[in-house]
Every structure is written in structure tokens, then in C-alpha cells.
Amino acid sequence: MSLLLQVPKRDALAELSCFRADFYSCLTTRGDELFELTDAVLCADGPVRTLVDLALAPEHRRGHGALYAGLNRGRIDVGRLRRTLVGLPLPRATDGRLVLAADVSPWLRPDANTSPDRSFCHTYGRGKNEHRMIPGWPYSIVAALEVGRTSWTALLDAVRLEPGADVAAVTAVQIREVAERLVAAGQWKPGDLDILLVLDAGYDVQRLSFLLGDLPLELLGRLRSDRVMRRPTPPRVYDPKGGRPPKHGGEFVFGQPDTWGEPDVQTVTATERYGKAVATAFDRLHPRLTRRAAWLSHGAELPIIEGTVIRLKVDRLPTGSEPKPVWLWWSGIDASATDVDRLWQAFLRRFDLEHTFRLLKQTLGWTRPKLRIPEAADRWTWLIIAAHAQLRLARPLAADLRRPWERAAAPNKLTPARVRRGFRNLRAKCPLPAGAPKPAKPGPGRPLGSKNRSRAVVHDVGRVLKTGEPYSRPGHHKQGTKPRRITA
């Protein structure tokens, strides 16, 4: 059970009121507009479809012009807001440790030719196994996970990835800053269990483990099924022929069972949704690094990053499809049977972050506004994160305002969307730090019939080379070498 569920209702209301006051103090410029915009997101009837519709909510007492002015010219003390988020009660695992998850979610902007700093975001198409690269703003988001099947997470940080950014390097800096804020807030103290960071496929988990080796972190990430690992270095044996001693042991090929050998640990668990789950662990395996890609500029000798490889195989999937084995890599070694079960169950909780992304996009309208500048998108992103934090604090206070066709749920089992339905009633019990709007008249605008003489600049989708120069695709044929077309 998370710590949030153990807070009494009276303390939860005080915690919500304190967070709203702290959040308002983080809005340094045009704070009244931004604060009422966040309340409009929380109290709107139904999902947020467009940004301008929020100006019609009763909680937004200003016009639609103030709404856009707050996003375009407002200022948020992001550093203070980050410290406020890590200071809230955070969910913990059954053993008391913090479990974090990091993932990248794109804000797709395919038709925004005048928006700078767009990158090609990897998304799924409509066809089967169809992958497309669509321009947008990718955001790296870090959240704390709860125990059990739930759609609740505690969002802690969000960073927009620049075009050509090294995802592993940016994630390493982001996780380091989050861990330092957790230690400063007293969420982790010396003697506590290490924080577990869960990552999905696409992250270089071994490199992240090397970059974050000085922090109280354990990394758990999914690997591709075509990877090849190496066993520990064999003991040195005298060779009369001489030569350099081997640095790596034999190969461990994921797709070749004859290279696995006997597992160090094997557990069998009966589950309700997946049937029998068999987890086999192989200790002290490491990848064979070469001086390419991220390790090209590594001056010292390439390290040997040992860890534990876990293979998870289940009988069935809830969707009815054929289950494939899942390969995981843990930064620790000498794993016990308890550690193996704890790790693969923690990996399943990583998918709760996908439910949070769906809530942010489909209900709270994170990617709905058609904003031009990325700085305005960053402000809107932090407003959505602050709104989600208020929903989490209001979780033990909200009543179940269910639809006639919905099933009744226990007070501590409400989804974020159901908590949002009753937030308007909770808002009346909390102080409102935003000031009343001042009467004003709209500006004259551009004279009727005049042309727009300040055209917006068209930006290409960002692809940056290692030299820092923008990428431009060369022509298929050089000038003067285009083949002549033969006509009849």
C-alpha cells in the first residue's frame, strides 16, 4: 500500500491546499492566468478538446486572450516546482523502496512548419507492426510507481529533448537531478534500500548504469531478443605460445539456448492474468563494448559492466496472442530468488506509466493545444503535471461520481478520471490564491483589410549532425549529371 493512502482525509485536504499555494508561488509572471488555466483543466466537463474551450469554464474568470498570453509570455519557476513535487508523499514498494520509471512520450506536431526544435518521433502507424517517424516534441518523463495494478503514478520531472540529443546522456542527467532532489527532500536516507529505476526497450541500460554508478540506484531495463552478452573473464591459464589473455568469456546468445547453460536462479510463480510465470536468471553477464557510437570518445579503457540477465516466460497473455519471452537486465549481481521475483514484477508496473500518458493526452489535453513556440509547450506541460499532482493529492478526498452504466468503486480505487469529476467540489474547500481579474477592453488588433507583414519563419524538422550543423539531404544527382530522359 502506498503512503498516500495512509494519510487521513483532514491531512490530505491540508496537503492539497499547501500544494496549491506552493504551485501558485512558482508562477512568477502572469501567475493568475496560469493558475486559473490549471483549475479549468481540472474542473472542465469532460475531456479537454481545445485550449480555447477552457476559457468558458466557470473557474477561468478571464478571457481567452489572457489564456494565450499566460502560455506565451508567462514564467514558471520550474526548479522550485520540481522540488515541490519530490516533497509530496510518494508511493513505495512493499519493501519500502522507491521505484521510478522513465520513458519518452511525443507531442506530435506534423503540420507545424513554423514551430522550431521539432524532431522525428518514433510512433506506431495504423497498420500491423507499422512504424512511422512523425515530427513533434519528445518529452522525457520520470515518475514514481505504485504497487499492484493501477493507473496512478507520481510525476516528478519532464524534459523536452532537443533535436539530435543523446537520449542516454539526457536521461542520465535527468535521473541524477531527480535522485539528488529526492535525497535533499528526505525521501531517501543513508541506510535505505536503493532506488529502483525501470526502463523499457530503447534505453542503453548498461551505459546508464555506468553513468549513474555513484548514485544509490538499481537499474532494470528490457533488452532486445537478438542481443549477445559475454560471460565473466575466464581465469588466466599459461599459454606457451604467448599472446594477450582474453578479456571476455564465452558468448551468451539470447536466440540460441545451447549457449545459456544452467541458470543461477529459477523461479515459478502462478499468476491470475498470465498463468505460470517462469523466470530464469543468469548472473554476471556483460556486453562487449567497442569504441563506436556513445563509447567513441571514452578516453579510458572500456569498462566491463556486469549484471544479471532475467528471462521471463508466461503461459498466456490477456490479449490472447502468443506470448514471447521478455529479456531483462539488472545492474546488480548475485540475485536471489526473491530479487528475481521482485524485479520482473516491478517491470510489469512500468506499464502503469502508459496509462498516465493516456490520461495526460486524452483527458487532460496535454497535446491538444496548437502552440507554436516550444517554450509555451514546456509551460503547458508543467501545468498538466501540476494538475496531475493535485488529482493525486485529492485521491482520498474525492467521491465516486460514477455514470449510471459504470460500476461502483471503492474510495481508494478511483481512477484519475473519476477523481477529476469531483475536483470542482474540492476546489471550493481550498483557498484560491489567484486574484480577481481586472476589467479591460480588447485591443484594436490589425486593421481590417491590412496584410500580415510579419510572416512566421518556416523551420525544418531538426536533424543535427555531430558537428552541430543542420542536416540537409543531398540531391540524388549532382548538378549537370542528371540522366537524360529518352522519349519516343
Image (tube, grey):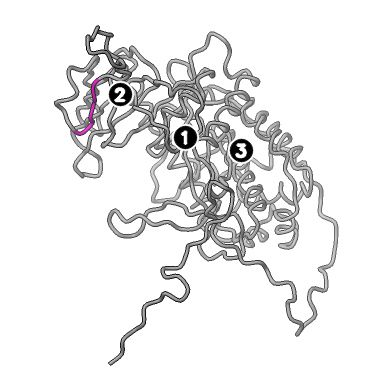
Q: CA distance from mark 2 to mark 3?
A: 39 Å
Q: Is residue 370 magenta?
A: no
**Quick one: quadrant of the N terminus?**
top left
In this view, which residue lies farthest toward the bottom? Answer: 488
Residue range corresponding to the magenta coloring: 250-255
Left or right, 224 with respect to 67, comes to left
Look at label 2 and name its amino acid.
Answer: Val
Residue 181: x and y in percent read 63, 25
Q: Earlier in the sequence, mark 1 or mark 2?
A: 1
Q: Earlier in the sequence, mark 1 or mark 3?
A: 1
Which residue was labeled with disc 1?
296
Against 469, residue 9 (above or below) is above
Look at label 3 and name its amino acid.
Answer: Gln
Look at label 1 and name its amino acid.
Answer: Leu
Left or right, 477 with respect to 486, comes to right
Left or right, 132 with respect to 360, comes to left
Badge nearest the viewer, 1 or 3: 1
Which residue was labeled with disc 2?
309
Which residue was labeled with disc 3?
390
